[in-house]
Amino acid sequence: MAQTTKYVIKYKLNGERRFEFAQLENGTAEEAKAALDAIHGQDDVISEISVSKAL
């Protein structure tokens, strides 16, 4: 099993600021986008993704 770290993902969902916590391996924007796609529907527009380690 891969080592994961808790990250906070800040993003806009359909123009509205949101954030989620996720366990990610590397904390890359691509990894965060995949996690957000799993949470939200196909019709939602996700933009301005920023990832940082949770405190």
Image (spheres, rainbow, N blue to C red):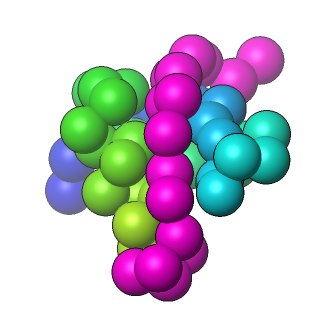
With respect to residue 42, does 48 lie above or below? above
The magenta segment is: 39-55
Q: Residue at x 28, y 43 (%)?
A: 31
Quarter of the image where the C terminus is located: top right
Residue at image location 20% in from the left, 56% down from the top: 1
Residue 11 in sight in this render: yes
Residue 45, percent from left and from top = 50, 59
* Percent position of residue 11, x then y: 62, 37
Relative depth, front residue between 55 and 11? 11
Between 44 and 32, the residue placed more toward the observer is: 44
Q: How many marks?
A: 0
- Residue 3 visible somewhere in the drawing: no
Q: Is residue 21 magenta?
A: no
In the drawing, does residue 7 fall left or right of residue 36?
right
28 left or right of 19?
left
Quadrant assignment, res 32: top left
- Hey, which residue is sitting farthest front in the picture? 15
Q: Is residue 47 magenta?
A: yes
The residue nearer to you, when weighing 10 against 22, is 10
Q: Is residue 34 above or below residue 33?
A: below
**In this picture, is 1 found above or below 30?**
below
Instruction: Give coordinates of residue 51: x percent, y percent.
Output: 51, 23
